Amino acid sequence: MSAADTGGGLPLNVRAALASVGTALFLLVLKTWASIATGSVAMLGSLADTGLDLAASLVLLFSVRYAAMPPDEDHRFGHGKAESLAALFQVALIAVSAALIAWRAVERLLKGAPVEQAESGIIVSVIAIIATFGLVAYQKSIIRRTGSVAIEADNLHYQSDLLLNLSVIAALVLDQYLGLGWTDPLFGVAIALWLGWNAFRGASRAIDQLMDKEWPEEKRLAFIEVAHRHEELKNLHDLRTRTSGNRDFAQFHVDMPAKMTVAESHDIIHRVEDDLRTHFPDVEVLIHIDPEGHVDEPDNPLVEEDQFKKLEGSE
């Protein structure tokens, strides 16, 4: 299903982004009050993370709307990479959040300060877990249907928020009820490290798209197998693939009889493209025809040549 599918309303990506903004606003109000009431550095870290969540969600909302715009005269491959840029912005915010939380936690560990009204912080954290779990589940359903890298980056961040809120509860319980005052800042440091790890994961996926990294090998080979079902195609080679936002792009060369007319070859290629799009929704396919017997001399032969010949040999 296309990310642009509205299902009778807003596009799916936009719905997910609006849900993210609404959840962040709700949690920001709750955690601001809880942070003031408790004085907990772990709760402060959770508040800072939620504030950055809100900023990231607003950028996400803009990016998915922009990325969903159809190709135009200046962007003929579409606007999908806006999602990758938004994901990198989210990653930068996560990294800043992690650094600030770590600094505050170390300061608290050295100077010390009591946690107050732990019950308020615990209640707020439980509410935050319920709200965040609902958002994460909803976003996952959208990711499965759209493959949005920006929504996925946002989802990774909110998954970390589940652990973050559990950590806040543990820190408050250990500090307030067991008298282990050093646990609150230590949990703050752990939260900062977790956020840093998520920043690295999110950056890797966004950079892969911006750098036009090839599809995963399993997906490439599945694509080749679908193309191989068409007996008219011979020697598929020079397959190049990439992903931009919620759209896939693939181009490759195939051999066809040298004496075949342009009209005949066009009809065959059109059927192949339709079949590929059925199995790989939202893919834009470009097929180059070589006359059978023509020999290309690529600098680096690609894996699909051997794979295609292997499939031919198994028949």
Image (cartoon, rainbow, N blue to C red):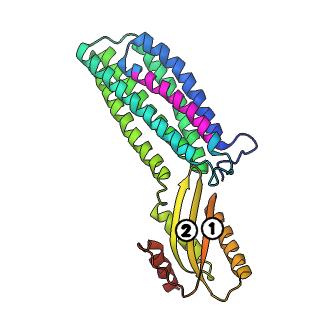
* Residue 134 vertical position relative to residue 140 in the rendered view, above or below: above
**312 to 241, vertically: above or below:** below
Q: Is the magenta stretch mostly helix, strand or loop?
A: helix
Q: What stretch is highlighted in magenta?
A: 45-64
Three-letter amino acid code at disc 2? Phe
Instruction: Looking at this view, name the residue that lies furthest to the left.
Output: 110
- The answer to whether 88 appears left or right of 40 in the picture is right
Q: Tell me where residue 165 appears, x and y as whole percent.
A: 43, 27
Q: Nearer the viewer, residue 194 or 250?
A: 250
* Dot 1 amino acid type: Leu
**252 falls in the magenta region:** no
| Mark number displayed over residue 223 | 2
Among numbered discs 2 and 1, the one appearing first in the sequence: 2
Badge 2 vs badge 1, beta-carbon distance below 8 Å: yes
Question: Where is mark 1, residue-wise?
Answer: 276
Answer yes or no: is residue 88 visible: yes
Residue 302 at x, y = what percent? 44, 72
Image position, residue 89 (x, y; %): 48, 36
Mark 1 lies on a secondary structure that is: helix
Residue at left offset 57%, top offset 43%: 82
Q: Is residue 96 or residue 261 the one in the foreground?
A: 261
